[in-house]
Image (spheres, rainbow, N blue to C red):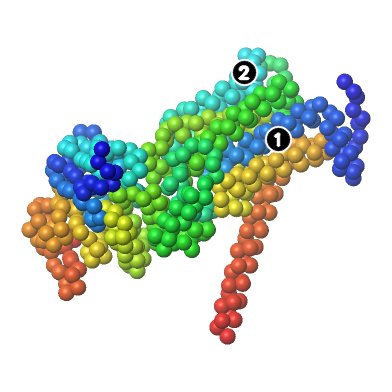
Amino acid sequence: MSVCPIQGFSLNVVSDLQNMWCFEFMQHAAEAGTITAIIAGITGYFVVLRRSAFTAHAFSEIGFAGAAGAVVLGVAPLAGLLAGSILGGISIAILGRRVSNRDTQVGIVLAFSLGLGLLFINLYRGGYATATYSILFGEIIGVSSWEVTLTEVAGICVVAAMAVLYRPLLFASLDEDVAEAKGMPMLFLGTAFMLVVAVSVSFAVQVTGVLLIFSLMVTPAAAAQYLSKRPSHVIAFSVALALLATWVGLFVSFYTNYPVSFFITGLAFGAYIVVRLARWASKQGALSARSSSEQRQGA
Amino acid sequence: MHPIGRETRIVEAESLAAGYGQRAVWRDGFFSFGRGEFVAVIGPNGAGKTTLFRMLLGLQRPFAGSLSVLGDEPRRGNPRIGYVPQRHLIDSDTNIECLELVRLGLSGKRWGFNPFSTRDREDALAALDAVSARELAHRPLGALSGGELQRIFLAEALVSNPDLLLLDEPLSNLDIRRETDLLHLVNDVVRSRGVTALLIAHNINPLLPHLDKVMYIANGKIATGKPNEVLTSESLTALYGVQVEVLRDPHGNVAIIGVEEHHGDVL
């Protein structure tokens, strides 16, 4: 393995990128981050549309208990994370969408899962703080090559599943009663979607951690829905924003040594604020244009 | 095989009862609606009006008796039924254009990511034309008024060219002017397409100029027939089980009044 030169940030972005890319861990981080941003951007749209953001967050906390349990058992945390969030996804889907929108019950399960995770972490004597920290706040820099491969497989599965589910899921999310009367398999759709969210959440946790999961699963999609009135375009914008936050976050973090998760969260938040402000400004503009044209007509 | 869409009896019920579990909500429903009839379904909350729709849609089995829809047993997902459920207003945050919702009425059942063929788009625009809402095609759902939304929902139901249209309280949340507009629109659709429409409402008066039949559901019973047959003191007294008086003004509006002192509220 060649030794990468240690050099700081220069104004030459190309050479900065080349330098960053020289490090294998940065390649892994960029690959896993890219795939995660794509699947989080796609599923995030439906999470926002179905108002399931809180449920998605609960998955990540149930996943935290699973990951911590896996650490105790000496299994890869990612396996526990997947098992935990998938279990949560299936149970919520079976209990039904009305249950998944009940904040109180979801919150109760969420709190218990965090507590359980804390207990597991306590049972594990080695590297107590590091393990907790990386699950809660993300450790994309430490992603191994087999985890990248796994992320790729999961990414292909999620994108394929969403491509098949797209229209029925959109219909069921936007107009539940009519979709049910039209004979759509609502339980199947709900379960399939919850599974997709559980898998997406598990991989997004690698990047942002359990606590910052919203920054990839919710914020980009929430900002994107103001950019277009057509769902397929909103999904494209959502993916683009998630990718932008991840790439820029990785780059800035590499040269500043501050946590990637912070930059991803901050960039996603910044994009959301800019979009909301732009929308507000354009509304004000339209209002004043209308009132001035009315004044002209009145004169 | 009989030619599709040519039945004359669109809905037919014999000694039909509706209910959940052990409890019947209403019984002894005998009614039959033909092609192109406009029917109002009237009754208080909880009388079982929506339950009737759920049975027609195949979402719920008859409690007793027989029910046939378009010459067949009711079945979920019958593409020949258009349904506009009772619903709360759409969240003002919903930034999705109306055309997308109307298209989903046609292609929402299909799997796969085929971002809407051009045929879908043309059919959806035609459905919007049918409810005079073409100019709303690219407006976001969340920005529409109550009356505009009802027109979009109607277009979503019409886009698959149904033979039976079920409208659950489309007039709630509308002022008198919008109410009249929407009823004219439904009436035009019924007459021009030969669609049979069942419309649930609380107040019969705005509907009277358009109706072929009226169905009253109250007190666990059903009365169905032409408006001037059902809207009589005798038939409503029999239905409600208290003395009822039907009064008419010169414009044909009716007032239905319970005349017994201890049941003196307007029904």
Mark 1 lies on a secondary structure that is helix
Amino acid type at image mark 1:
Thr
Mark 2 lies on a secondary structure that is helix
Chain that bears disc 1 = A
Judging by the rendered image, the residue that carries numbered circle 2 is A70
Q: Residue at x 33, y 41 (%)?
A: B78
Q: Residue at x 64, y 23 (%)?
A: A78
A259 left or right of B229 in image = right
Looking at the rendering, which quadrant does residue A57 occupy? top right
Is the same chain shared between marks 1 and 2? yes
Quadrant of the image for the C terminus of chain B?
bottom left
Residue B142 visible, this angle: no
Compare residues A181 and B82 and report the one nearer the observer.
B82
Mark in the foreground, 1 or 2: 1
**Residue A172, position as x, y percentages in the image:** 45, 41
Amino acid type at image mark 2:
Ala
Q: Earlier in the sequence, mark 1 or mark 2?
A: 1
Query: Which mark identifies residue A34?
Result: 1
Q: Residue at x 52, y 54 (%)?
A: B97
Q: Residue at x 54, y 53 (%)?
A: B95
